[in-house]
Amino acid sequence: TTHALANFSVAAVSAHVFLHLRDIGLDPIKASTVIPIFAAIGFSFQLFGGLLGDRFEKRFLIASFMFIQSAAMVILALSETYLMALAFAVTWGIGFGGRTPIMHAMRAEYFGARSFGTILGLSSFMMSISMIVAPVTIGYVFDVQGTYRWSFLVVAAACLIGSILI
């Protein structure tokens, strides 16, 4: 459930970040630079998160990185400038990147290598539902409201709830 709550934000970013950045007035070149920035930072923090996950309590780390991911969604929702978009990219890369390897390691730790595939498959079902529902819902809300702000804030709240539940 917590991973599904976090993945609402992943789906929102994947499907709508460029559209949102264009909607707030960024030109296509600047808007398109945000994605590789958060991808590069996310990759770096996957390595860092994995190292941390081997040394410290995984639930605390996941909760912390999910909180950062939630904060990134708030920054994105309130973004009105390129500088704010860059702040989102850095924060998102840290939160999403750091959380990802630790979540998988925690599954293996809790359920063992023998059951890892089954557990990952079952949890992937819930994650897939959030990844399907979020982009369509956010797109619909944008069509009705003319802004991504409220959808992104709701998604941030879902990620924050996941952070607390973990």
Image: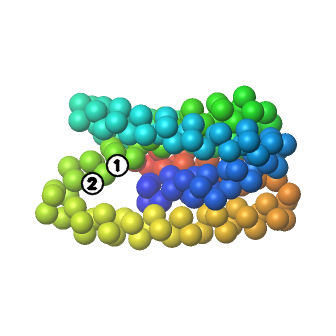
Query: What residue type is disc 1 on?
Result: Met
Where is residue 139 drawn, in percent x and y?
73, 64
Whether residue 30 is visible = yes
Is the residue 144 above or below the residue 51 in the image?
below
Tell which residue pokes out farthest to the front in this image.
29
Instruction: Report the disc number at residue 126.
Output: none
Where is residue 48 drawn, in percent x and y?
35, 32
Q: Nearer the viewer, residue 109 or 76?
A: 76
Cβ–Cβ under 8 Å for marks 1 and 2: yes
Task: Report helix, strand or loop for mark 2.
Answer: helix
Q: How many residues crowd around disc 2 within 10 Å: few (fewer than 14), some, or many (20 or more)?
A: some
Query: What residue type is disc 2 on?
Result: Arg
Q: Nearer the viewer, residue 113 or 32?
A: 32
Check disc 2 and report the residue beneath it. 107
- In the picture, measured across the screen, residue 69 lies left or right of residue 144, that is left
Residue at the spot 60% in from the left edge and 44% down from the top edge: 35
Res. 59 image quadrant: top left
Q: Quadrant of the N terminus?
A: bottom left
Check disc 1 and report the residue beneath it. 103
Separation of disc 1 and disc 2 at Cα? 6 Å
